[in-house]
């Protein structure tokens, strides 16, 4: 027995130390802290009405890039959580291309190809949290669990943040921060994109800026579909427009069925400019051979001025 399921919170945030099951991917995890993100959902009606007024943000609308649909999307605020994944569950998360990690660049003086990762660190939307309570004092296997959280008898939840967690969050805020989420649905296939800035590399000619982007595909319909091809357009502020085509994603051609309706993966992109845009399509195929292009919502690649700190814990 893992623990006892609790009622999901309809109002307010979950606390640091809350144990949970992921609603879509099924793994055990623990909440570290919340992020307030702007969600740009191209499926939602854009007019202001009484139901959306309360969650409209004051941020300017996201404008589609060159070549994208000429449609302005209002950002709506939504809570996501930084979480640790239980290492015991990682081998069984079959509809994830890899164990979710936070990746970042090392010091500029090092090899320019170096890329570091902290595995088992994820971002989870509020509605994907299924909270549970447990009597175990060490209920999760992750090397950062004991460094970040302390068991506290009588506290609810019974795990509280240590100073190391607060210091780590503050020190690495620019590289951990989840700020924008983009969503769009085509023929019952919903694509969600979350971009993260990772820093830049200096070379002799110019700086190279890096981003990670996390993509989730969800099948909201009844028919099984398979992702066959990807087609990306990458626009750089330097004026270049690149097209990237290929079979599948990260070496896979995932199948989205009623049993396993979601698939998630992360990838990286670099530009020789501090900002740009990406958009594109996934070629999807149903079992009867019917194929269609599923739109990837346009998203911006924005850089930050700071230099990445080392994310390792000492």
Image: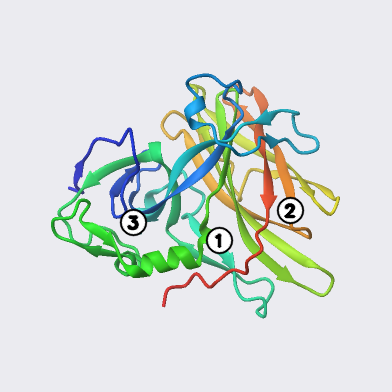
> How far is the residue under mark 2 from the one under mark 1?
16 Å
Q: Secondary structure at mark 1?
A: helix
**For the point 24% across and 44% down, which residue is it?**
132
**Mark 2 or mark 3, which is nearer the start of the sequence?**
3
| Sequence-first disc among 2 and 1 | 1
Q: In the rendering, which numbered label is found on residue 175?
A: 1
Q: Contact (CB < 8 A) between labels 1 and 3?
A: no
Give residue 46's quadrant in the image: top right
- The Cα atoms of the two marked residues, 3 and 2, are separated by 35 Å
Q: Please provide percent x and percent y for residue 159.
A: 24, 58
Horizontally, residue 266 falls left or right of residue 26, namely right
Residue located at (71% from left, 40% from top): 279
Disc 2: which residue? 275
Classify residue 305 as left or right of residue 125: right
Q: Residue at x 55, y 40 (%)?
A: 38
User: Can you say whether 142 is above or below 96 in the image?
Assistant: below
Q: Which residue is mark 3?
A: 86
The location of residue 22, given as percent across then percent down, is 36, 43
Q: Residue 300 at what x, y percent from top left?
A: 68, 45
């Amino acid at each position: 027995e893992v623990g006892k399921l609790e009622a999901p919170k309809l109002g307010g945030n979950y606390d640091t130390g809350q144990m949970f099951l992921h609603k879509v991917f099924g793994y055990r995890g623990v909440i570290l802290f919340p992020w307030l993100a702007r969600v740009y959902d191209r499926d939602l009606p854009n007019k202001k009405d009484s139901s959306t007024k309360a969650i409209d943000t004051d941020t300017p609308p996201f404008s589609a890039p060159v070549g994208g649909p000429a449609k302005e999307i209002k950002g709506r605020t939504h809570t996501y959580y930084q979480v640790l994944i239980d290492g015991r569950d990682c081998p069984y998360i079959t509809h994830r291309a890899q164990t979710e990690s936070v990746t970042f660049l090392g010091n500029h003086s090092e090899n320019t190809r170096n890329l570091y990762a902290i595995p088992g660190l994820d971002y989870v939307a509020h509605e994907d949290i299924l909270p549970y309570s447990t009597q175990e004092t060490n209920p999760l296997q992750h090397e950062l669990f004991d460094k970040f959280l302390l068991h506290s008898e009588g506290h609810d939840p019974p795990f509280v943040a240590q100073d190391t967690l607060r210091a780590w969050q503050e020190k690495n805020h620019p590289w951990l921060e989840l700020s924008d989420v983009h969503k769009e649905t085509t023929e019952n296939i919903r694509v969600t994109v979350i971009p993260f800035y990772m820093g830049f590399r200096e070379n002799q000619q110019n700086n190279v800026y890096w981003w990670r982007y996390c993509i989730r595909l969800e099948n909201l319909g009844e028919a099984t579909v398979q992702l066959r091809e990807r087609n990306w357009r990458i626009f750089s502020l330097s004026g270049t427009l690149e097209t990237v085509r290929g079979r599948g994603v990260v070496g896979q051609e995932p199948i989205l069925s009623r049993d396993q309706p979601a698939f998630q993966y992360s990838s990286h992109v670099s530009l020789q400019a501090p900002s740009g845009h990406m958009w594109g399509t996934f070629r999807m195929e149903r079992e009867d051979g019917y194929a269609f292009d599923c739109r990837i919502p346009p998203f911006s690649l924005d850089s930050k001025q700071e230099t990445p700190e080392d994310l390792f814990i000492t």
